[in-house]
């Protein structure tokens, strides 16, 4: 005997924190006068925080002594913990004190619902029978008193909870005594003693001790709170095992607290002990297994004992369930399972077994149920189960008596409601039918209500595979009750998953108050191996529908003369297309097997084998009746549209082997494919040899192409393309790429046409799929000159299936087919014997002989659009004879084509190079009549010779554009040139600069009014920054003036160079900027941008006449160097000039004095003076907007030195002169 000092687990820190008070396990001998006092060490832990908060000693006393109540507390920074020690009751006679379990969440209990349950083991010594009467434990609650308890018992299974012993006990009341409160927390504590309704015997006739388990759970307290079971930490070694835990008793596992430790709950089990019964009759272990891959949300089952107590139960289930439960009990037991609900789509498998094997098994259809009774420990497994039961011996009679071997295999299938058919004598309810027709019982369907419940009573499977003329005979009664009439209908179906159909005439809706005999033919039963019947009762508060003594009979079908055995099973399933040609049903076929063929009524079919001596049989789909047979070929015309079997055997003795052959079918009239109705066509478009096919619906993976040739001197206009494809679906879109020939393989794509087929003709079958002859009528014809071309198709179907281009070994046109796996970059021969099946068709015309040279061995060089400014434009430099440039011309404009080599022969053709439009020795004048692109060829002579010497191809159009000097009195720079030698990058940049100089003569001033800059690129600049720099010893110096965000007033394209136009840009300078330059050298430095962001090039010339060559800087103007070729840039700086001198101005209308001057300067002018500005010699403005005061200007504010005066007169007349200030 053992006892334990115990601990209490409860809620000390509020609902979110649990504490456990643990004590060490103490062993003691069996004692009748209590047990020894013991002092133990305890630990107080927080389960959530997983930390020890207190340790200390407690003193426990025997029951005969006064229990000590020692209150302790532990103070932390934010919490105060209370707990109290308790005394353990002494064991009673033949009682054992074992540990129990306390855990956070013993759920409330309702029979059959989910709730937490804990189990502890106890020991029955060898040779002892223990009659358990009471179970005592301590319970702590948050508030309120515990109410009822559930108790169940289990066998031990390897130190854990095993099979349940007998039924569970639900809702037991108990003796519940208040035992104060738990420490200073205020939580009530209760002593609970559960007395079993009858003693529970645990018999152990063995010599070794045996463990049993008791599982306990409790309902909510009277205040709807949880109850907690006092427990201790599990210590080893121990004769007992730690606590186990389960949800609703379905899956058990050893319990671990949050610290990962095992516990034992305090428990006293009491009762009587006696010698064990030698036989130890406790019953046997029953196992129920229920499973399916589908949902089980409408599945439920129970296993009950003879007192109708539920031992174990299960359901409902989610998707893909597999549950096994076990219980120990004596018989007889009853197993019930149903699959009922709103959907009736559950089909559970089930087995009930004991030590003798599987006693019950089967599978329910949705909306049905099954009940199995009288299951005993000594029951033997049946020879067959309802799931495997087959009725194939006739006549067969069902009496519905208790000893009927298959009565339990008649299942209820609910149609409306859940009322079962039952087995009893007559209809009951006081009607006239009170006895069975024969024997003691009959089948009965009734419900004493107006609700129209309906249920089918479904039969086991009938096998009529060797039978014919099946009939159903039965007796029934259906007495009305004061006008209320139940109804009976009889159904059949010819497969387990088929639909029920009422047997013709089998509807009984009138009064039948005595047993009435019925005989019915069973429709569509001949040769069927999976056949079922059902009696459906419909309740309308009549006396009840009764059925008895049902007999099914059938005749043995005569032996079939064909060969219907198929040891090698089925191979192939095919629907003929009836193209009038042989269609392969199955290749690699054997004798002794069959293919399914789907045939149409009234169509004649010819069945054959590739082995001419084979014996052929055609049967119905189930292989029960021969419809046609004989040596290959066999002709058969079905009278019903349906599936049929097509057998092959070695001979009419139905012998078989595994040698290969093909099963072939032919039907319909042949379809003749004709040549295109055009004068010209190319390709192998008609063939009867369908040998292969190439995929053309995935060009990223593979491309296929085949060639055709346009004869010399012929222009071929393609108006139609035909192509044969081999797949189930007709393509809905095609792209035809016409490629030029590139040394015997496909080259570049030169034409493309995309369209849907105009028509499709099914004319053959190959590789099990139809062959379609597709016709495509081109909306826009494709015109080709003489030469070899390749057609490379790409097709798609709406169903996104593959499209296969038919290939033939009987081709005769051109090179063999080629394919590519790198998007056409390289090609290789598919098969040297294979051509693709296609036609290209249209009109052929002879091409008149031309004198131009259209061959271009060196291909294209250059693509140019003329600007047409009346001077030669370079179309292509470093060009060769024997090549061409593309030029974009305007209708009605006269163009002059020339070469820098005057003896060159020039040809102008259309864009494709198929037609000469003009030709002759350079220069050549021609005017196009259409806007478009044209080829500009050069050759050495009119014999079209070529070499690799360089020349320029030139074009000229339009009137010459003359660039004139700016219309100002002074102009500086090289702004006009005909020598275009280079161009310098002046794109807006952080570091790169280009500058060119100009010089103002002595005693001269320049008010800058306009700047022109010539640039050489396709676009007109949209923004410019122009810096004017001082001279620094022959190089650009500091910036004096800056013109920002300048936009050209004019942009004149007047020539071209380097393949781009030259623009003369004019920038008008705002007079208010007052850019006044005196004698000396200056540098102009522009920076520009174009809309596209590309480079801006400042035109440079060798025909320079002024100053130093243009200078360049690559460090933002810090250092400068002249360009390598000593070129000048093309620009003008223009404006108004003035001349500096003394007061002897030649214009007598204007005078100034004195000069030099000290204080006041006098100015005299016939025209009114509007303003006076003063500049130093560096060009910096010192005074602006002075007004004359009595013809005088004060000079006192100016420092001594030389100054330039600019006087603005009425009418924008400007006078400029130099003054020395003393």
Image: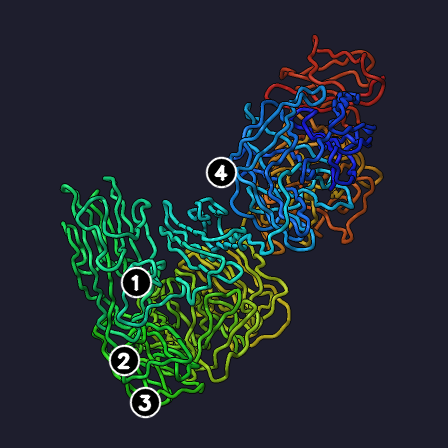
Query: Marks 1/2: CA distance?
Result: 24 Å
Q: On the rendered structure, is 786 left or right of 1218?
A: left
Q: Residue at x 26, y 43 (%)?
A: 447
Crowding at dot 3, Cα within 10 Å, few <14 / some 14-19 / many 20+, comes out as: some
Crowding at dot 4, Cα within 10 Å, few <14 / some 14-19 / many 20+, comes out as: few
Q: Which residue is mark 4?
A: 111
Q: Counting residues from the N terminus, which is met first, the one under dot 1 or under dot 4?
A: 4
Residue mark closest to the camera, 1 vs 4:
4
Query: Marks 3/4: CA distance?
Result: 69 Å
Answer whether labels 3 and 4 touch (C-beta < 8 Å): no
Q: Residue at x 81, y 36 (%)?
A: 1037
- In the picture, which quadrant includes the C terminus? top right
Secondary structure state at the residue bearing disc 2? strand
Residue mark closest to the camera, 3 vs 4:
4
Query: Marks 4/2: CA distance?
Result: 61 Å
Answer whether labels 1 and 4 touch (C-beta < 8 Å): no
Q: Counting residues from the N terminus, which is met first, the one under dot 3 or under dot 4?
A: 4
Q: Which residue is mark 3?
A: 652
Q: Which mark is residue 2?
A: none
Residue 628, how many percent across, how many down?
A: 26, 82
Q: Which residue is mark 2?
A: 626
Q: On the rendered structure, is 658 left or right of 475?
A: right
Crowding at dot 1, Cα within 10 Å, few <14 / some 14-19 / many 20+, comes out as: many
């Amino acid at each position: 005997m053992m006892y334990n000092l115990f601990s209490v687990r409860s809620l000390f820190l509020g609902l979110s924190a649990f504490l456990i008070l643990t004590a060490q396990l103490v062993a003691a001998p069996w004692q009748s006068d209590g047990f020894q006092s013991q002092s133990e060490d305890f630990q107080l832990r927080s389960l959530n925080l997983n930390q020890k908060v207190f340790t200390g000693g407690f003193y426990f006393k025997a029951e005969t002594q006064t229990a000590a109540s020692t209150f302790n507390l532990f103070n932390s920074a934010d919490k105060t913990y209370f707990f109290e020690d308790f005394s353990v009751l002494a064991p009673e006679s033949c009682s054992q004190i074992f540990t129990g379990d306390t855990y956070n969440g013993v759920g409330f209990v309702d029979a059959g619902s989910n709730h937490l349950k804990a189990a502890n083991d106890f020991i029955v010594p060898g040779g002892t029978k223990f009659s358990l009467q009471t179970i005592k434990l301590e319970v702590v609650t948050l508030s309120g008193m515990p109410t009822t308890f559930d108790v169940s018992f289990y066998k031990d299974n390897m130190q854990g909870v095993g099979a349940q012993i007998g039924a569970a006990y639900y809702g037991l009341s108990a003796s519940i005594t208040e035992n104060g409160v738990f420490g200073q927390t205020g939580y009530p504590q209760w002593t609970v003693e559960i007395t079993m309704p009858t003693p529970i015997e645990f018999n152990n006739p063995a010599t070794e001790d045996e463990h049993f388990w008791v599982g306990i759970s409790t309902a909510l307290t009277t205040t709807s709170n949880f109850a907690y079971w006092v427990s201790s930490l599990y210590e080893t070694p121990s004769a007992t095992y730690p606590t186990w835990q389960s949800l609703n008793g379905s899956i058990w596992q050893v319990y671990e607290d949050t610290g990962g430790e095992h516990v034992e709950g305090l428990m006293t089990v009491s009762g009587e002990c006696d010698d064990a019964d030698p036989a130890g009759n406790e019953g046997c272990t029953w196992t129920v297994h229920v499973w399916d891959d589908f949902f089980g949300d409408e599945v439920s089952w129970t296993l009950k004992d003879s007192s109708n107590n539920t031992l174990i139960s299960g359901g409902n289930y989610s998707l893909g369930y597999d549950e096994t439960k076990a219980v120990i009990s004596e018989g007889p037991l009853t197993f019930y399972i149903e699959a009922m609900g709103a959907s009736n789509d559950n089909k559970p498998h089930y087995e009930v077994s004991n030590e003798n094997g599987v006693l019950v098994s089967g599978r329910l259809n949705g909306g049905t149920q099954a009940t199995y009774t009288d299951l005993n420990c000594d029951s033997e497994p049946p020879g067959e189960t309802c799931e495997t039961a087959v009725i194939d011996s006739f006549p067969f009679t069902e009496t519905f008596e208790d000893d009927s071997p298959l009565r339990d295999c008649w299942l209820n299938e609910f149609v409306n409601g859940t009322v079962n058919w039952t087995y009893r004598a007559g209809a009951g309810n006081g009607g006239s039918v009170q006895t069975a027709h024969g024997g003691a019982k009959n089948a009965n369907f009734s419900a004493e209500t107006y609700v129209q419940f309906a249920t089918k009573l479904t039969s086991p499977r009938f096998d009529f595979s060797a039978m014919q003329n099946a009939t159903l005979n039965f007796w029934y009664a259906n007495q009305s009750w004061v006008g209320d009439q139940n109804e009976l209908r009889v159904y059949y179906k010819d497969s387990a998953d088929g639909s029920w159909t009422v047997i013709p005439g089998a509807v009984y809706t009138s009064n039948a108050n005595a047993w009435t005999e019925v005989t019915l033919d069973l429709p569509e039963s001949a040769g069927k191996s999976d056949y079922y019947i059902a009696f459906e009762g419909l309740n309308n508060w009549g006396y009840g529908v009764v059925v008895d003594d049902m007999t099914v009979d059938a005749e043995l079908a005569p032996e079939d003369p064909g060969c219907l055995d198929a040891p090698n099973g089925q191979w192939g399933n095919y629907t003929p297309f009836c193209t009038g040609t042989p269609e392969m049903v199955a290749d690699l076929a054997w004798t002794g097997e069959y293919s399914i063929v789907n045939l149409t009524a009234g169509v004649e079919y010819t069945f054959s084998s590739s082995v001419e001596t084979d014996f052929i049989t055609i049967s119905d789909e189930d292989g029960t009746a021969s419809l046609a047979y004989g040596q290959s070929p066999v002709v058969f015309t079905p009278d019903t549209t349906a599936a049929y079997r097509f057998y092959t055997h070695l001979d009419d003795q139905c012998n078989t082997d595994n040698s290969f052959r093909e099963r072939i079918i032919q039907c319909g009239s042949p379809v003749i494919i004709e040549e295109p109705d055009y004068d010209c066509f190319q390709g192998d478009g008609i063939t009867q040899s369908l040998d292969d096919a190439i995929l053309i619906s995935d060009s990223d993976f593979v491309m296929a192409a085949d060639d055709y040739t346009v004869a010399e001197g012929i222009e071929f206009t393609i108006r139609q393309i035909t192509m044969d494809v081999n797949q189930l679906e007709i393509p809905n879109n095609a792209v035809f790429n016409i490629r030029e020939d590139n040394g015997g393989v496909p080259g570049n794509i030169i034409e493309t046409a995309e369209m849907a087929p105009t028509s499709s003709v099914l004319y053959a079958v190959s590789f099990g799929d139809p062959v379609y002859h597709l016709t495509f009528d081109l909306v826009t014809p494709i015109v080709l000159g003489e030469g070899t071309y390749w057609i490379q198709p790409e097709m798609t179907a709406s169903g996104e299936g593959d499209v296969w281009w038919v290939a033939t070994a009987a081709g005769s046109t051109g090179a063999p087919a080629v394919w590519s796996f790198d998007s056409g970059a390289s090609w290789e021969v598919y098969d040297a014997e294979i051509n693709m099946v296609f036609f290209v068709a249209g009109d052929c015309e002879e091409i008149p002989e031309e004198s131009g040279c259209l061959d271009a061995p060196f291909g294209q060089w250059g693509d140019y659009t003329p600007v047409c400014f009346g001077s030669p434009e370079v179309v292509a430099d470093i060009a060769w004879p024997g090549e061409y440039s593309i030029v974009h011309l305007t209708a009605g404009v006269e163009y002059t084509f020339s070469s820098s080599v005057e003896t060159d022969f020039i040809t102008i053709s259309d864009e494709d190079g198929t037609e000469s439009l003009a030709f002759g020795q350079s220069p050549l004048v021609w005017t196009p009549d259409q806007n478009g692109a044209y080829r500009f060829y050069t050759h050495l002579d009119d014999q079209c010779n070529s070499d690799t010497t360089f020349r320029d191809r030139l074009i000229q159009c339009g009137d010459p554009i003359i660039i004139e000097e700016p219309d100002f009195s002074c102009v500086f720079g090289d702004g006009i040139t005909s020598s275009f030698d280079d161009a310098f990058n002046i794109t807006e940049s952080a570091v790169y600069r280009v500058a060119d100089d100009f010089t103002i003569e002595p005693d001269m001033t320049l008010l800058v009014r306009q700047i022109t800059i010539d640039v050489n690129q396709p676009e007109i600049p949209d923004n410019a920054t122009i810096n004017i720099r001082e001279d620094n010893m022959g190089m650009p110096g500091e910036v004096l003036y800056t013109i920002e965000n300048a936009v050209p007033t004019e942009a004149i394209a007047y020539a071209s160079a380097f393949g781009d136009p030259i623009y003369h840009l004019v920038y008008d300078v705002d007079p208010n900027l007052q850019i006044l330059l005196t004698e000396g050298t200056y540098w102009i430095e522009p920076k520009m941008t174009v809309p596209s962001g590309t480079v801006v090039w400042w035109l440079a010339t060798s025909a320079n006449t002024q100053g130093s060559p243009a200078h360049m800087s690559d460090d933002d103007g810090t250092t400068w160097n002249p360009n390598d070729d000593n070129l000048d840039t093309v620009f003008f700086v223009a404006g108004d000039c003035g001349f500096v001198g003394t007061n002897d101005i030649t214009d007598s209308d204007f005078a100034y004095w004195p000069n030099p001057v000290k204080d006041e300067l006098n100015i005299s002018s016939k025209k009114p003076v509007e303003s006076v500005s003063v500049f130093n010699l560096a060009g910096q403005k010192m005074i602006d907007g002075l007004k004359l005061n009595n013809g005088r200007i004060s000079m006192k504010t100016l420092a001594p030195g030389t100054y330039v005066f600019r006087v603005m007169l009425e009418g924008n007349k400007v006078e400029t002169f130099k003054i020395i200030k003393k």
